[in-house]
């Protein structure tokens, strides 16, 4: 069987079956699509019990040779990156594969000159500019480990991530453009670095032209260093299981976790899922609107498209600046064929009406994608009708930071494309449902908690510095299975539909947020006695953040709920970033608790969702009287 793209239902069925029946044979053949320095001695070893999973062990490679060097002969002059700036009248910058390769080598040499070595952690805190992508690849080229922190996080959140992975260098911008705003990235970095003793140098890429404070000996402007560096840098020979990157994500408890992805398995997963799910042709133009600060940007900007030699748009701005036609204007301008975005963006644009879409010629589009949260039927229909003109398949791709790449998705030419269905597992993905009692649910139709039964190449191997937490978080709920944290359904034909998180993680505008993390931030306020945060349905964000807080009754603001909300917003912005601001804050005198002192979140979730009848049995509560108060004060 040829390991090229899956083109029809038969291909899909054959590939899928083979991937489970002859896993080693299947992946050995797929891996043949890539360039290796030394071959592997085993395709896959280890299991979910011992959590020692390895893919392509014994092999050596460098992912950037697969993204860049191997295209130079056949695609050297092909455009790799079309940089579309925040300002629609700003300068578009194109990089061919040759130019990108040269720039990456220069950046690698700059990192080396700063003393960065194989295995060191390199932190990026930047806006969506080409230097971010180039720097990420340069880090991988010299065998260092990148940790990209989204430019919307606060100094405190940045510091926590730098401290956790003990990065030695951070790369930032003077400031970043984001719609009508500029974000003072260097200033925020300086604030964070007050508590980050491991950082030895800071490289600053000039974007906005903002005055910044440069600390002698520590801080350096990036451009002059890049310009004087050699365009030649041999790629470090990496072991298949050597770390490639760390990416922090929220969970239901504790601080954000640094998921660790390794080289070979991640590469094969990012490359193959991109190829099969999007089916981007040689002359097509791919555009993923995510930020590289999230996993979607890692797998479907930094790696997947380049592994496949595609041309892609990299966008600095936001969907609604200068107006709600920004995506469609850029789609027309660059003749984008494959467009991948989040439901929250679609809903936000839908609210501005169809004129912004219809003004533009979108006839270049062939495939649309959705990622990050369940897409509701209405948003799906709007996307299909107004953007895809009912001729573009919509790939609703379900996956996670932990999975490294897409796991469940309809494929063009294969899928049935039913709104809100992610449909079918990709080859190598072995899903299983488990019910509340931990029993496996077979057959269809069915519903349950979504687990994965066997290792796949793209899975995260550990949590940086805390393998035990990795084990606890993902593999202890249902021993022997990877638990995703999501609930799902299968219809009578076995097609998958993801229903959302079943744990204390909420999904706000496609961003994962731990309710505990937001509570920790709120509790930093001196007048907060206790808080509980839950998600509730939000028209645009998917889920909004609803905070119940007990406020110090002695405080002068105790009656001024507006002022309380404002102060809490400021606290959350300081501790995490604006994305975690509570949409609603309800001041309460107590939180419903079980006799063992646990907050009954079920009740709080219902009230936040506007469901005040049907609260279930509240008689076992320690303080049933607060339920009435909470109901009557619901926002
Ligand atoms: C949710 C983003 C439904 C899900 C790639 C998952 C989705 C979490 C979908 C991971 C989808 C992502 N349909 N839900 N197509 N895609 N999710 O780590 O709850 O930022 O567990 O990765 O987003 O979020 P993360």
Image: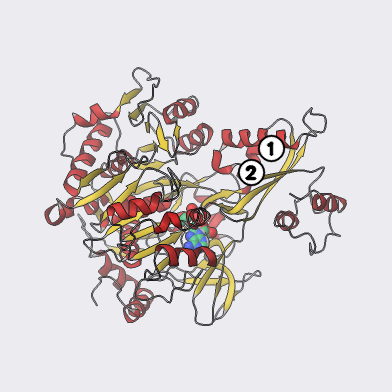
Quarter of the image where one finds residue 503: bottom right
Q: Residue at label 2?
A: 582
Q: Residue at x 41, y 62 (%)?
A: 387
Residue at disc 1, CB closer than 8 Å to ligand 1: no
Q: Residue at x 24, y 52 (%)?
A: 67
Give the crowd class for mark 2: few <14, some 14-19, many >=20 residues within 10 Å: many
Is residue 463 shown above or below 206?
A: below
Label 2: element kind? loop
Counting from the top left corner in percent of width and height, residue 16 is at 37, 76
Q: Residue at x 41, y 47 (%)?
A: 291
Of callouts 1 and 2, which one flags the residue occurring earlier in the amino acid sequence?
1
Label 1: element kind? helix
**Of the pair 587 and 5, the residue shown nearer to us:** 587
Is residue 428 shown above or below 37?
A: below
In the picture provided, is 21 more to the left or to the right than 463?
left
The reply to whether residue 50 is visible in this rendering is no
Q: Residue at label 1?
A: 565
């Amino acid at each position: 069987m040829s390991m090229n793209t899956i083109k029809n239902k038969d291909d899909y069925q054959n590939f899928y079956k083979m991937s489970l029946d002859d896993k080693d044979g299947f992946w050995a053949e797929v891996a043949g699509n890539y360039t290796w320095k030394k071959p592997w001695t085993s395709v896959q070893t280890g299991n979910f019990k011992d959590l020692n999973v390895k893919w392509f062990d014994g092999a050596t490679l460098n992912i950037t040779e697969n993204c860049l060097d191997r295209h130079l002969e056949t695609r050297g002059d092909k455009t790799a990156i079309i940089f579309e700036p925040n300002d629609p009248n700003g300068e578009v910058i194109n990089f061919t594969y040759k130019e990108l390769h040269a720039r990456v080598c220069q950046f690698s040499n700059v990192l080396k000159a700063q003393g960065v070595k194989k295995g060191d952690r390199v932190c990026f805190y930047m806006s969506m500019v080409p230097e971010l992508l180039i720097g990420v690849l340069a880090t991988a080229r010299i065998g260092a480990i990148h940790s990209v922190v989204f430019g919307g996080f606060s100094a405190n959140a940045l510091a926590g991530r730098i401290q956790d992975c003990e990065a030695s260098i951070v790369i930032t911008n003077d400031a970043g453009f984001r719609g009508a705003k500029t974000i003072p990235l260097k200033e925020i970095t300086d604030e964070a670095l007050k508590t980050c003793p491991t950082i030895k140098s800071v490289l600053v890429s000039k974007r906005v032209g903002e005055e910044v404070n440069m600390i002698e000996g520590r801080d350096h402007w990036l451009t002059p260093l890049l310009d004087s560096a050699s365009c030649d840098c041999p790629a470090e020979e990496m072991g298949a299981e050597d770390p490639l990157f760390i990416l922090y994500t929220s969970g239901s408890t504790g601080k954000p976790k640094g998921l660790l992805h390794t080289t070979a398995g991640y590469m094969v997963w990012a490359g193959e899922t991109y190829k099969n799910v999007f089916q981007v042709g040689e002359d097509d133009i791919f555009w993923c609107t995510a930020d590289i600060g999230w996993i979607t940007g890692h797998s479907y900007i930094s790696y997947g498209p380049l592994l496949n030699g595609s041309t892609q748009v990299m966008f600095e701005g936001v969907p609604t600046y200068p107006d709600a036609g920004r995506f469609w204007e850029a789609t027309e301008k660059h003749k984008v064929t494959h467009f991948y975005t989040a439901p929250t963006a679609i809903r936000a644009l839908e609210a501005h009406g169809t004129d912004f879409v219809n003004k533009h010629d979108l006839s270049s589009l062939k495939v649309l994608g959705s990622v990050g949260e369940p897409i509701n039927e209405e948003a799906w229909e709007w996307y299909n009708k107004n953007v895809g003109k009912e001729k573009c398949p919509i790939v609703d791709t379900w996956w996670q930071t932990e999975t490294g790449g897409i796991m469940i998705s309809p494929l063009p030419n294969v899928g049935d494309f039913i709104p809100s269905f992610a449909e079918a597992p990709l080859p190598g993905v072995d899903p299983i449902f488990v019910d509340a009692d931990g029993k496996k649910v077979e057959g269809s139709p069915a519903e349950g908690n979504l687990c994965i039964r066997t290792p796949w190449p793209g899975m995260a191997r550990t949590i940086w510095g805390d393998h035990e937490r990795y084990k606890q978080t993902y593999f202890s709920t249902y021993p022997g299975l990877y638990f995703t944290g999501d609930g799902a359904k299968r219809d009578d034909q076995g097609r998958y539909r993801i229903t959302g998180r079943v744990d204390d993680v909420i999904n706000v505008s496609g961003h994962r947020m731990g309710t505990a993390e937001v509570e920790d931030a709120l509790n930093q306020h001196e007048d907060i006695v206790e808080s509980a945060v839950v998600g509730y349905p939000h028209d645009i964000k998917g889920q909004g953040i609803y905070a119940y807080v007990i406020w110090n009754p002695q405080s002068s603001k105790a009656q001024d709920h507006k002022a309380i909300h404002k102060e809490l917003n400021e606290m959350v912005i300081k501790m995490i970033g604006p994305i975690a601001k509570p949409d609603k804050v309800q001041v309460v005198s107590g939180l419903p608790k079980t006799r063992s002192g646990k907050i009954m979140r079920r009740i709080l979730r219902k009230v936040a969702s506007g469901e005040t009848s049907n609260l279930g049995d509240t008689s076992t509560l320690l303080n049933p009287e607060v339920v009435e108060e909470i109901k009557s004060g619901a926002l």
